[in-house]
Each structure stands twice: as C-alpha cells, then as structure tokens.
C-alpha cells in the first residue's frame, strides 16, 4: 500500500494505491516506487519516507504487505 | 510518595478534531499527576500555541487546516516523547494537538512536561515542541480568500 499526504496527494490526484510485488518488479524500494508510480524522476530532497508508519531510508527493501508513505515537509505545532 | 518515572506514567496524548481548552487539558493532566495522593512534581513547563490571524505572507487568515497521518502521528509523538523523557529524566508528558480546521486565536498545541528541576523541565519541553514541529507528521494549509495554500516548513523560532 502506498499513501500520499497533503500537497503530494493533491499534486498526484490520488491518496492511496495498492501495488503487488510481481516478477517484473521484484525488489521495490521507496526510491524505485516513486518513478514507478509516475510521481517523478526521483524523490525530491524535502520529501520523507515512512514504511509501516516509521521513518525509513529511501533504499529500504519493501516486503509484501508494507505500508509506504511519502511525506511532504512537516509543519506541525 | 516517590515520583513514578515517565515509563511508569506514560505520555498523555490527545488529538482534537474540534476546539479544545488548553487550560482544562492542563488541569486534567495535573489532577492525573496527583491522583492517589501522589506529590505534585516540583517543576512543570507548559507551552500553548495558538493560530495567528495572519498568513505567512501577511494576509488575513480565515482558518488553518491541519492534516495528519492517523496512526503514525500518534506513534511518532510517543517515540519522540519517550526519547526526550529519557534524555532529560522527565516525570510526565502531556501533548494536545488540533487536527482539522482551526480558527485564528484557537489553541493548536499544548505541550506540558513535569520534572524534578526547572532545567530539565524547560529544556525537555522546548526540545519536545521543536521535535513535534519537525518530526511529527502534521501538515498545515492556510485558507485565505477561499484559497488554500500548503505551508512548507515552520515559522521562525
């Protein structure tokens, strides 16, 4: 499952997508998902990644069932 | 009675989808701290943040919209609070944060920490607030003249 938030969701026009790990896309990482989903050539430096609701590295290998989120710059508090 | 550690008395966290009263929240937390006859902590530091009536560009603000990541936002605040509590030896932590549409003047965040000394209380409270602003997944959108603009980053310290 891939999720987008705030400005990223509105730019892409979707907020949640399911993706299967298939033989033609066997070893996904957040970095490879970004272009695979048509979000752009590479993840912009200000975008952070979470896997299963914890911050993660862009090259973290993904497993079936993982929840990946792309997070635009945080502005809380 | 000895003070329980922050591990024994975990973070109290509330995400409010509607307006909340930070002073009532604080009173609720303080009642909880002294429940069962426990001695009140010697030092507390509190911060209340309210929505200012101007956008980042100086225009009159209609409202601020706060989006969050249900599940991760709560988990991330718990992680942040646990790490800062350990680092500063905090006795207890309370965080209230608004989500949804927030009007100018309304409270958006309350951070309260308890410690045995003023130094850890003030340093821990400040560190917690800054960590919330940078590492807890919330996103602000300013509404002005019916147009919403996502805020990228935080206001000046």
Image: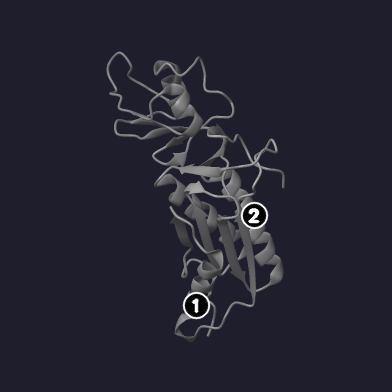
Q: Position of residue A47 (x, y in %)?
A: 54, 29
Q: Quadrant of the N terminus of chain A?
A: top left
Pointer 1 with pointer 2, Cβ within 8 A: no
Q: Residue at x 44, y 26 (%)?
A: A30
Q: Position of residue B117 (x, y in %)?
A: 68, 72
**Residue B46 as seen in the image, left or right of residue B94:** right
| Residue under label 2 | B127
On the image, numbered disc 1 is attached to which residue?
B31
Q: Which quadrant of the structure image shows residue B125? A: bottom right
Element on which disc 2 rests: helix
**Badge 1 or badge 2: first in the primary sequence:** 1
Q: Is residue B104 above or below residue B114?
A: above
**Residue under the image location 62 percent in, 55 percent down:** B49
- Going by the image, does B119 lie left or right of B11? right
Q: Return the residue nearer the eye: B75 or A57.
A: B75
Horizontal and vertical percent position of residue B122: 68, 63
Q: Residues within 10 Å of mark 2 (few under 14, many from 20)?
A: some
Chain letter for the residue marked with disc 1 in the picture: B
Please tell me if label 1 and label 2 are on a single chain.
Answer: yes
Residue at horizontal 50 percent and vertical 52 percent from the top:
B98
């Amino acid at each position: 499952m891939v999720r987008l938030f705030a400005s990223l969701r509105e730019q892409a026009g979707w907020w949640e997508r399911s993706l299967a790990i298939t033989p033609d896309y066997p070893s996904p990482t957040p970095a490879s998902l970004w272009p695979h989903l048509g979000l752009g050539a590479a993840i912009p430096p200000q975008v952070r990644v979470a896997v299963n609701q914890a911050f993660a590295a862009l090259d973290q290998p993904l497993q079936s069932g993982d929840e990946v989120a792309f997070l635009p710059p945080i502005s809380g508090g | 009675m000895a003070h329980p550690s922050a591990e024994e008395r975990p973070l109290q966290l509330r995400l409010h989808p509607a307006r909340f009263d930070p002073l009532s929240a604080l009173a609720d937390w303080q009642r909880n701290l002294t429940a069962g006859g426990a001695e009140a902590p010697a030092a507390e530091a509190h911060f209340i943040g309210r929505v200012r009536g101007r956008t980042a560009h100086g225009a009159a603000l209609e409202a601020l919209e706060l989006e969050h990541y249900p599940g991760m936002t709560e988990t991330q605040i718990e992680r942040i609070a646990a790490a800062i509590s350990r680092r500063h030896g905090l006795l207890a932590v309370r965080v209230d944060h608004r989500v949804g549409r927030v009007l100018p003047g309304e409270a958006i965040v309350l951070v309260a920490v308890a410690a045995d000394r003023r130094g850890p209380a003030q340093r821990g409270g400040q560190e917690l607030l800054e960590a919330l602003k940078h590492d807890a997944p919330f996103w602000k959108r300013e509404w002005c003249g019916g147009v919403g603009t996502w805020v990228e980053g935080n206001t000046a310290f």
